Image: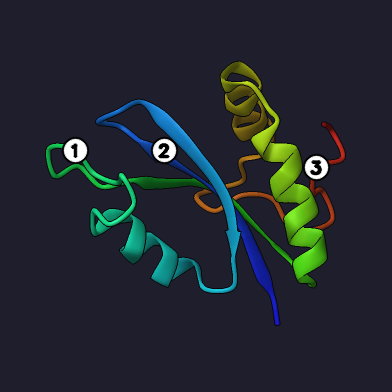
Amino acid sequence: MNYTVYILYSPSTDVYYKGQTSNISERLKRHNSGREKATKHGIPWKLVWTTNKASRGEALKLEGKLKNLSRERTTQFIQKYKVGVAGPDDSRGMSGC
């Protein structure tokens, strides 16, 4: 089973949310439903970066590293590793952080 590590962005609150899940589409639905401090003014969260990891342990480790990044470093990370819409492949991972 693949685990997805992701970064969401809320345009209405100007906040990043970093996490990991085994089902990113379900996670986005749940986040945008308003059940988790999600959406103000009806503006949904946007998926700004994602990658897949083979094990939950790897995903949790990467999530921990992402959560320790400051807002400025998070923005730099997204810009550095963003490839198209989704993000980098596993071979690039977080080698730059």
> Which badge, 2 or 1, is on the more N-terminal residue?
2
Label 1 sits on what residue type? Lys
**Left or right for 34, reference 63:** left
Label 3 sits on what residue type? Met
Residue 96 in the image, given as x and y percentages of width and height: 84, 33
Q: Compared with residue 2, is residue 85 higher up or lower down, i.e. above or below?
A: above
The residue singled out by tag 3 in the image is 94
Residue 39 in the image, given as x and y percentages of width and height: 23, 44
**Which of the two marks, 2 or 1, is nearer to us in this view?**
1
Label ID, residue 70: none
Residue that appears at 35% across and 25% down: 14
Residue that appears at 31% across and 44% down: 37
Tag 3–tag 1 contact (CB < 8 Å): no
> Which badge, 3 or 2, is on the more N-terminal residue?
2
Q: Compared with residue 26, is residue 76 higher up or lower down, i.e. above or below?
A: above
Tag 2–tag 1 contact (CB < 8 Å): no
Q: Quadrant of the C terminus?
A: top right
Q: Secondary structure at mark 3?
A: loop
Distance between the Cα atoms at labels 3 and 1? Answer: 31 Å
Distance between the Cα atoms at labels 3 and 2? Answer: 19 Å
Q: Secondary structure at mark 2?
A: strand
The residue singled out by tag 2 in the image is 9
Label 2 sits on what residue type? Tyr
